[in-house]
Image (tube, rainbow, N blue to C red):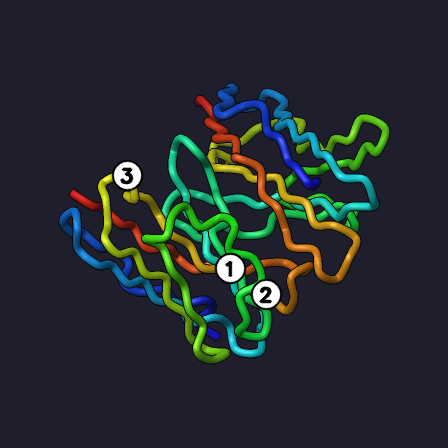
Amino acid sequence: AQRVTQPEKLLSVFKGAPVELKCNYSYSGSPELFWYVQYSRQRLQLLLRHISRESIKGFTADLNKGETSFHLKKPFAQEEDSAMYYCALSGDSSASKIIFGSGTRLSIRP
Amino acid sequence: DAGVIQSPRHEVTEMGQEVTLRCKPISGHNSLFWYRQTMMRGLELLIYFNNNVPIDDSGMPEDRFSAKMPNASFSTLKIQPSEPRDSAVYFCASSHGLHYEQYFGPGTRLTVT
C-alpha cells in the first residue's frame, strides 16, 4: 500500500540555518514524489517534483530509494520559507492517485 | 484561467444544518479531488472523480458526507447533518489526470457551532 510519512508536525529553525524536512514513503514500485507548499493565506501549490531534479526557491529534494526517503532541504533558511509543507507520492500506474503526507509546519525565526 | 474556484470561502452554520460546498475545476482537467485539512490530521483525501465518475470515496468519514460531479465543470460536497467536528478547511483540486500535478482551490473554511 502507498504511504507517506512526515514525522515532524512542526519544525522551527533560525534564519540562515539549514533546513531539512523529512519524508519517508512506502511503495513497492517506482513512485513519483512531490513536495507541495502552502504559504499563509495562499493556495496549496506544487513546489517541486523529483523527476525535475531542479532547485526551486533554493529547495532541493533527492529521491533515495534505498532509504525510501525524499527529504526537502535548503542550506540557508529565509523568513519567507515559513509555510506548511506536504510530501506526496504517486504510483507508477496511470490510475494511481497522489497520496499526501500529514504535513510539516516550518517556522523560520528571525 | 482563474484556477480552481470554490464557494463559499467561509461558512458558519449550526450543528444539524445541511452544508453544501461547491467547486469549479480548471477547464480541461478531468480529475477532481476533495480534501479536508485540520490541524490534527493534516490533509485528508475525501473522494476523487475521474471523468465525472467517483473513483474512490473511502476517505469520506461518514454517510453524512456525499459528493457529486454532475458535469465536467462542477462538483459539490454535502454534509447533512453537520456536526462541530466537521469544522475544517475543505479544498478542491483538479488535474489533467490522477497521476499529475494537482491545482488547488482557495478552500472553504467551515465552522459548525
Q: Which one is in front in this view, the residue at disc 3 or the one at disc 1?
A: 3
The residue pinned by badge 2 equals B95
Q: Amino acid at mark 2?
A: Ser
Pinpoint residue A80: horizontal percent, then vertical percent.
Answer: 48, 37
Mark identifier at residue B33 = 1
Residue at horizontal 28%, vertical 43%?
B87
Q: Which residue is mark 3?
A: B85
Amino acid type of the residue tagged 1 in the rendering: Phe
Q: CA distance from mark 2 to mark 3?
A: 29 Å
Mark 2 or 1 closer to N-term?
Answer: 1
Badge 3: residue crowd in 10 Å (few <14, some 14–19, many ≥20): few
Q: Vertical placement of B99 versus A11: above or below?
A: below
What is the chain identity of the residue bearing mark 3? Answer: B
Mark 1, other Cα within 10 Å: few <14 / some 14–19 / many ≥20: many
- The answer for how far apart the CA atoms under marks 2 and 1 are is 9 Å
Residue count near mark 2 (Cα–Cα under 10 Å), binned few <14, some 14–19, many ≥20? many
* Disc ID at residue B106: none
Residue found at x 28% / y 39%: B85
The disc numbered 1 marks a residue on which chain? Answer: B
Q: Chain of mark 2?
A: B
- Write down the quadrant of residue A36 in the picture: top right
Question: Which comes sooner in the sequence, label 2 or label 3?
Answer: 3
User: In the image, is residue B27 above or below residue A62?
Assistant: below
Q: Secondary structure at mark 3?
A: helix
Q: Are marks 2 and 1 in contact (CB under 8 Å)?
A: yes
